[in-house]
Amino acid sequence: AQTVTQSQPEMSVQEAETVTLSCTYDTSESDYYLFWYKQPPSRQMILVIRQEAYKQQNATENRFSVNFQKAAKSFSLKISDSQLGDAAMHFCAYSFNFGNEKLTFGTGTRLTIIP
Amino acid sequence: SQTIHQWPATLVQPVGSPLSLECTVEGTSNPNLYWYRQAAGRGLQLLFYSVGIGQISSEVPQNLSASRPQDRQFILSSKKLLLSDSGFYLCAWTGGPGETQYFGPGTRLLVL
């Protein structure tokens, strides 16, 4: 079974600084997707960024970028120029491309932004 | 554009009472639909998913059931709630293979 591990329950960063959140996963598949979602206090799950495993290029989305290391099964999220709105629970998730797109989530990292 | 709705937003129910949570998606057809539960301070656990009308797959055996009576409607039910059913329930959809899951606003359920 696939598992997703987030080893940092909590992280904090000064506003405008850069922070990296870690995620590792375990799978025997070669074709899959990885995601970072954030959950602010409203508890709405919001997509931050996604990565297709077959792509070697790391995904970027404005201030957000990932470091995808397929061989190491590592998928970290880098947030540049941290903003107060980035304060949230951040979840790493995995989806195997099998047609039903079920997501397996990590336990999350609570990110605090220090003004 | 597509939108996903869930109701109610908050629900307080006594132990042993029935449950019905509803999720609807607008702006798309034949979506894959999902129910997740999030216990306090925890990640999301997939409960059920559906790839079409009347097609339900259960991930975790428990006190809950799901139904999909219409293409864009997904219902989570229980005949008798347990204290352990308390949590935050999220519905999600995707348009098909390889596509991102998008989540509804969630329902907070408290069983007393």
Image (tube, rainbow, N blue to C red):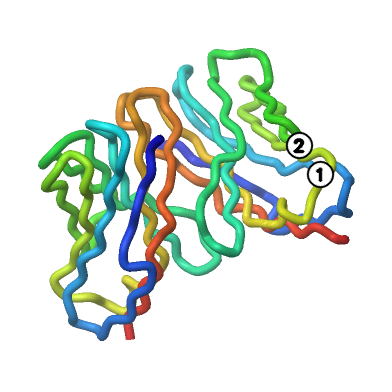
Which corner quadrant of the image does residue B82 belong to? bottom left
> What secondary structure is found at the residue carrying circle 2?
strand
Cα separation, mark 2 vs mark 1, equals: 6 Å
- What x and y, as percent, mark residue A100? 31, 31
Q: Are marks 2 and 1 in contact (CB under 8 Å)?
A: yes
> Chain for mark 2?
A
Q: Which residue is mark 2?
A: A78
Indicate the position of residue A115 as horizontal and vertical percent values.
88, 61
- Residue linked to disc 1: A19
* Above-or-below relation of A98 to B91: above
Q: Is residue B86 depicted above or below B27 in this figure?
A: below
Q: Say whether disc 2 or disc 1 marks the residue closer to the N-terminus.
A: 1
10 Å crowding of disc 1: few (<14), some (14-19), many (20+) = some
In the rendered image, residue B76, in percent from the top left (x then y), is placed at: 23, 59
Q: Residue at x 80, y 57 (%)?
A: A113
What residue type is disc 1 on?
Val
Q: Can you give x and y, in whole percent of width and height, for residue A99 in the image? A: 31, 25
Q: Residue at x 41, y 65 (%)?
A: B88
User: Which residue appears at 23% of the width and 40% of the height?
Assistant: B50
Tell whether B90 sits left or right of B48: right
Q: Is residue A109 left or right of residue A31?
A: right
The chain identifier of the residue carrying mark 1 reads: A
Residue displayed at 57% across by 54% down: A39
Within the image, what quadrant is residue B101 found in? top left
Which quadrant holds the N terminus of chain A? top left
Q: Is residue A13 left or right of residue B21?
A: right
